[in-house]
Image: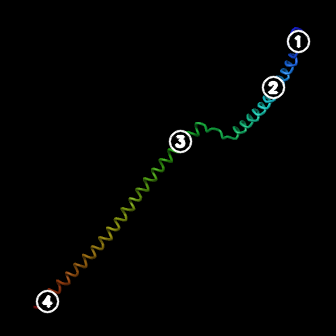
Amino acid sequence: MDLLVEFMPDMGDVLAAQEDALTSVIATLASQLQHLAATNEQQMQRMAQLESTQPAAPDALILEAMETLTSKMEQLQQNVQQQVAEQMQQALIGELRNEATDSLAEKTEQTEEAVKNQLDQLEKRFDYLSRC
C-alpha cells in the first residue's frame, strides 16, 4: 500500500470521494426502491378495493337463463306480431264486408226504386190503354 501511496499520493482521496459518491447513489436507490414499494402497495390495495366493488361474473346458469329468456321473448314478439297482423286482416275483412253489405243494400234499394218506377209507368200505360 505504501508503494501505491508513493506512486499516486492523491489516490486515497479519489477513492474516498468515489466511495462517498457510491454510498450516496446506493442511498438514493434504496430510497427510490422504498418509495416504489410503498406506491406498489398502495396500488395493490386500490386494485383489491376496485375488484371487491366489481360485480361478480354471472355463472353459467344465469347466462343460460338469460339466453332462454331472450329466446322466449323473441318467440313471444313474433307471436304478437303474427296475431296483430291476423287481427288487422280480420278487421279489414270485416270492414270490406260492411262496405259490400252497405253497397248491396244501396243497390237493392235503387233496384227496388227502379222496379217501382217501372211498375208505376206500366200501370199508367195500362190505365191509359184500358181507357182507349
Q: Check disc 2 and report the residue beneath it.
A: 25
Tell me the SS state at disc 2.
helix
Most extreme residue toward the bottom is 131
For label 1, the residue is 5
Counting residues from the start of the chain, the first of labels 2 and 4 encountered is: 2
Which numbered mark, 4 or 3, is in the foreground of this view?
3
The mark closer to the camera, 3 or 1, is 1
Structural distance between the alpha carbons of marks 3 and 2: 62 Å
In what quadrant of the picture does the C terminus appear?
Answer: bottom left
Image-based side of 87 in relation to 48, left or right:
left
Choose between 17 and 106: the one closer to the eye: 17
Left or right relative to 44: residue 65: left
Q: Position of residue 10 (x, y in %)?
A: 87, 17
Q: Residues within 10 Å of mark 4 (few under 14, many from 20)?
A: few
Q: CA distance from mark 4 to mark 1?
A: 169 Å
Q: CA distance from mark 2 to mark 1?
A: 27 Å
Q: CA distance from mark 4 to mark 3?
A: 90 Å
Direction top: furthest residue: 3
Residue that numbered label 3 is attached to: 67
